Image (tube, rainbow, N blue to C red):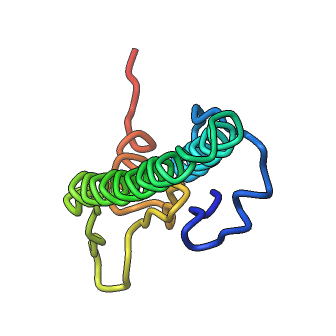
Amino acid sequence: MTTYWISNLCVLLKSYNIIPFGNDINENFNALARLIIFITIVAILTFNETESDNILLLGSSFLILSVVIYFLVNRIYVNFSRDNYKTADIKPLNFNNNKGLDNYDNMSSTKKVTGLRNKDYTAFTKIQHTNFKK
């Protein structure tokens, strides 16, 4: 993830992309800032000198407006991701005996079972002691 150009001004010079359509929000707003700066420079060079102050004022106001929109979008995104975080999905640890955990789930969703439990032994012995009559 790239940084926004307010925190690091050199980010605007690392890339020449002026099309703000990508996956990263910071990259999109950096491209938008480059586009606003490019259009402002082209407009200053093409129009006469009397309107260059107005063009510079308009370009800088669009740049400030893009910064305000970035911070609003970023704040909405952070609040939305905080609201979607559910603590109810966290499973508590189950202690089935006095020796410790019967099983546990780690971060990679693998499950470790610590051997046969008492109910498994009884099922095994019942099958072993069954007499089959003809």
Residue positioned 60% across, 44% down in the render: 40
Is 19 situated left or right of 16 in this image? Answer: left
- Quick check: 62 above or below 20? below
Residue 18: image location, x then y, percent: 67, 38
The residue shown at (38%, 21%) is 133
Farthest residue toward the top?
A: 134
From the viewer's perspective, is 69 left or right of 28? left
- Count the marks: 0
Question: Going 43% across and 66% down the picture, which residue do you hit?
Answer: 104
Residue 43 locus on image (x, y percent): 62, 37
In the rendered image, the quadrant that contains the C terminus is: top left
- Is 131 left or right of 36, judged from the image as shown? left
Q: Nearer the viewer, residue 10 or 94?
A: 10
> From the image, which quarter does the N terminus lie in?
bottom right
Left or right of 51? Residue 90 is: left
Instruction: Give the quadrant of residue 4.
Output: bottom right
Q: Position of residue 11 (x, y in %)?
A: 71, 62
Residue 120 visible somewhere in the drawing: no
Q: Could you say which is closer to the camera, residue 47 or residue 112?
A: 47
Residue 97: x and y in percent read 29, 77
Can residue 82 be seen in the rendering of this structure? yes
Residue furthest to the front in view is: 50
- Quadrant of the image occupied by residue 47: top right
Residue visible at 26% across and 69% down in the picture:
92
Position above or below: 74 against 44: below
